[in-house]
Image: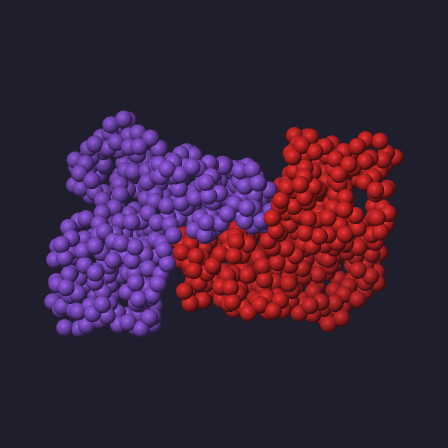
Chain colours: A purple, B red
Amino acid sequence: MAAYDVIVIGGGPAGEVVAGRTGEAGLSVAIVERELVGGECSYYACMPSKALLRPGDLSDEIARVPGVSGGELDVAAILRRRDEVIHNRDDSAQLPWLEKRGVALLRGAARLTGERRVTVGDEEHEARRAVVLATGSDARIPPIPGLAEAKPWTNREGTNSATVPGSLVVLGGGVVGVELADAWASLGSKVTLLEAADRVIPGEEPEASALVKDGLKRRGVDVRTGVKAVGIRRENGEVTVDCEGGPNTTAEEILVGLGRAPRTTGLGVETVGLEPGAYVEVDEDMRSRAADWLFAVGDVNGRALLTHMGKEQARIAADAIVGRDHGPVAVDGRQSPRVVFTDPQVAAVGHTLASARDAGLNVRAVDHQPGSVAGGSFVGRGADSLARLVVDEDRRVVVGATFVGPEVSEFVHAATIAVVAEVPLERLWHAVPAFPTRSEVWLRLLEHYGL
Amino acid sequence: MAAYDVIVIGGGPAGEVVAGRTGEAGLSVAIVERELVGGECSYYACMPSKALLRPGDLSDEIARVPGVSGGELDVAAILRRRDEVIHNRDDSAQLPWLEKRGVALLRGAARLTGERRVTVGDEEHEARRAVVLATGSDARIPPIPGLAEAKPWTNREGTNSATVPGSLVVLGGGVVGVELADAWASLGSKVTLLEAADRVIPGEEPEASALVKDGLKRRGVDVRTGVKAVGIRRENGEVTVDCEGGPNTTAEEILVGLGRAPRTTGLGVETVGLEPGAYVEVDEDMRSRAADWLFAVGDVNGRALLTHMGKEQARIAADAIVGRDHGPVAVDGRQSPRVVFTDPQVAAVGHTLASARDAGLNVRAVDHQPGSVAGGSFVGRGADSLARLVVDEDRRVVVGATFVGPEVSEFVHAATIAVVAEVPLERLWHAVPAFPTRSEVWLRLLEHYGL
């Protein structure tokens, strides 16, 4: 039986970070991975989806800037670049990072087999200090009659397909749904998007939903909100979706973007009293409530299903394991920073106006268009856009911000700093945005507020 | 004699803001403009230069993103768009903004003619409360033999030319020089840039200078540092520059980017004891030291020759005139936020490592490449880049930041908030950048620091 200070189960971004950070602190660490080191994000989610989205995004921008020709997409070249970004699903490029930090890699499926015991294949290992679950999540396949049998695309096929389907129906207008609808439509697929709620990305500001919907329509996506899939049939090489709230629809392929399910089955979590198939509840140190030696980071704990938040949780867990103070998690859950890479993009942090009111905060929203400031004349000219700050009137600090527009993904970090550091409005007022950048929208927002 | 509470001399961005803000506060305000309302920035500087630069920038990005065709520039369309951005030098679009705020526009040249007296043409006006100088600056034409006689382009012709010169020699590798060298080279001119110092944009980090120089060379600009123009001759339709430190050079046109000179001649400043041709020294309220009723904002006070800082000073002066507390100017002078819109762009705020050390601060610099984080795979792929934080080790706050790379202009506002709000590193650490954005460079920088 080999022994390590820390055994991390799952080699995705969160698992890698907790292993690397505890390894750097001098602990002996093993990471167990049954598929590819780098995880869902690197091969089947964030990375390939952005590789598919960026060319369409750039093409849109070319159309908006007078005097620059081109913008036609070469689908084969884009798919090749996507394959390059995912290293053709070969994880060898990820290994030196772990090696450099002294992390042992155990390939295989792991299961908990006792207190601080992890079995990989036939071999049991001891974790002297901690076991960290970082197994991530799978696409949730809800019990819609016929859905599982229709072998739907999940994020995996939806990001890794070697060909562009002639037509595609997307179930769900959350982040996965809108991003992949945008991507495949930009590559020439005839896409229909079905969302049961009355708007896409329903967790974001309603105005953001409307702008993303408009963008999808410009891309040629048939966006149907208030429409629910109730039955699926695949026959004669086509998938038909029976709908409530709208007409049935048929396509070559179907993609399911209806949420995630934690990977906690077959892991032996029942040996510590946890329920297989459920999220692993954790405290502020990312320690499970089941056992003080068991931690859970990333999607599997259900707090915030975002790669960057999984990595943040991993740093926090690592510090807790090492015995270093990590300070409080500043934003978490639905309030985490988040970016939707459609065109227009949505970049947000903290509360929406509605979530702030639901939380009982005394808030006011101020709006402006980043595209309407001087800097908007050069980037994303003429495109609809929105910037919203949600201000806590009692504390005079920003508790939420949403930016919508072409290439606003880098806008959110300024707001994240403002929200996390609780910078008083009067100080933000003297953080002067450079002219002529679109960041001048900050000035307009604070002027509208009354400064 | 007409009387106003406030008379603002100069209708550029700084003048407009001080007039608008005092007008909004209920004061009676007149603004005097001898040329175009909107000022140098709107017609002859920031705005048209960005209109000329953006297409080349976008074309470079197209070349870096596989699968997107095109990127050829249509010079005529770009010049048309430039003309649209500067409203064909017609300022009527600027007037409703002033009207809405009740600001009277007096067209003509103004001069001080006594205590709180401003004469425009033949008419003298009284300023009951304040006179604000916002006259801006002109390109400085240093006494290089033959330079003035050669009728060099300044920022005016350099941004407004209706044709692309076959060849152009640019004197000075400051912001004006590098931006306009980049712009005209992207439009097909054969550009030579002469800079007497050993690097371009010498006020920025040396690594930023090197990356901008590399970018200019890729654009085809012949960048010659350590070379000083000592004599200029225009003959037979060509300009020859005699040089020290390098060979002489010849071009169709010559552009001078050798600093600015305040517009304080012919203004009657001698009536209040100020020296014509010198900057107007001001205190923290932007009040001149010459008279308590005389303010100066924007380039004319010499504090920070940047449009956004002129507007910040205008807000401060307006608050002082109105009698409202404005709080301290947070960053100023050389430490102001600043963006150089070359490709790569440079976006910086606060100290460079050298300026911090010169100021006696106990600082450490940490570096990383924004292009090397996951988000760099999609934007500006493969391009050289730099992010540097300058950390005050005694106070554990960021006192300077520099970002260099493709389209990093919107990166600086996050750093400006961090610097202005003096956010402790331990808080910045929990401001999680979204994956996969290039803002993740913040995480790497703070990790390198030791968090």
Instruction: Give the percent coordinates (x, y) of residue B112.
Output: 83, 43
- What's the residue at 76%, 71% (across, down)? B244
Left/right placement of residue B15 relative to residue A149 reads right
Residue B77: give x, y in percent of width and height: 62, 42
Quarter of the image for residue B400 reads bottom right
- A327 or B41, which is in the foreground? A327
Q: Is residue B113 above or below residue A7?
A: above
Asked whether, in this view, residue B252 is left or right of residue B331, the answer is right
In the rendered image, the quadrant that contains the N terminus of chain A is: bottom left
Count of marks, rendered view: 0
* Residue at horizontal 22 percent and vertical 30 percent from the top: A242
Residue A377, given in percent of the width and then of the height, sits at 58, 41
Quadrant where the C terminus of chain A sits is: top right
Along the viewing direction, whichever of B128 and B180 lies nearer the viewer: B128
- The answer to whether residue B152 is above or below residue B196 is above
Q: Quadrant of residue B191?
A: bottom right
Residue A288 vs residue A201, the one in the foreground: A288
Residue at 28%, 32% (x, y): give it.
A196
Residue A170 in picture, x, y percent from top left: 29, 38
> In this picture, is A230 found above or below B10?
above
Q: Is residue B263 left or right of residue A214?
A: right
What residue lies at 18% left-to-right and 53% top-to-bottom? A264
Q: Is residue A79 at all visible to an observer of this figure? A: no
Is residue A149 or residue B175 the one in the foreground?
A: B175
Please say whether residue B84 is visible from this viewpoint.
yes
